[in-house]
Amino acid sequence: MSPDAGVRRAEAHHAATERSSGFLVLCEGIATGLLLIAVVGSGIMAERLSGGNMGLALLANALATGGALFALIVTFGPQSGAHMNPLVTLTAGWAREMPWPRVFAYTLAQIAGAVLGVWLAHLMFELPVLQTSQHVRAGIGQWVAEAIATAGLLLVIGGSRAHGLPVTATAVAAYITGAYWFTASTSFANPAVTLARSLSDSFAGIAPSSAPGFIAAQCVGGLLALPLLSRLRL
């Protein structure tokens, strides 16, 4: 093979890799957007149909979110991994399972997809697309809940992966559905989701002033999970 042919082959391989990486990032953005449509859309629908029964609305919101999570992980897991969460992506980078440039690309795609998903949910229910939440969620109980929810989510993902994608999808969906109820914060457990939900003054919203506390608590939960994650990933 001539040197020129070798160069052309290397360039073609690089271009194919770049296209593949771009597709993975796109999948991650789409999956996160669909997740937020499910979270916010089901919250709006639940609030409208529950007749003021907040427990019933939360149950509907939790079940819809869990169902969507299962479907999205099964669908996009073989493509991008269906992280849909910057902390899941960061732990993959920390474990050297993903190059750091892709970690950053995934994170940006998740945030952009989440925000777009919230806007599309508003549009679908004929609400103002641009809005901010008035739902204040603050205090030590909320922050502890978010740290626990996030640490638990990362451990569930790390521990269930050895059993295959369908088991992981089931475990994550079951955990989040349950965590809606056993955590005081209703288990956001995701910085991209938290940021996007601050842009929705709906049942699923969180006031922008409360979002930094939630995100900080989620990061603490992620750090707490790291020592065990290295063992669970073996």
Image (cartoon, rainbow, N blue to C red):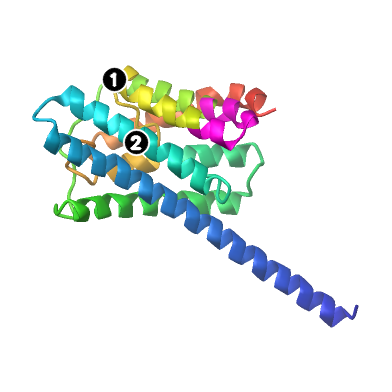
Q: Secondary structure at mark 2?
A: helix
Q: Residue at x 51, y 22 (%)?
A: 224
Which of these two is toward me, 112 or 27? 27
**Residue labelled with disc 1:** 184
Q: The C terminus lies in which quarter of the figure? A: top right
**Residue labelled with disc 2:** 65
- In the image, the segment drawn in magenta is 156-169
Q: Where does the image place residue 233, in percent across and percent down from the top left? A: 65, 29
Q: Is residue 18 left or right of residue 173?
A: right
| Residue 11 tag number | none
Q: Residue at x 60, y 21 (%)?
A: 228
Q: The N terminus lies in which quarter of the figure? A: bottom right
Q: Residue furthest right?
A: 1
Type of secondary structure dominating the magenta stretch? helix
Q: Is residue 60 left or right of residue 158?
A: left
Q: CA distance from mark 2 to mark 1?
A: 17 Å
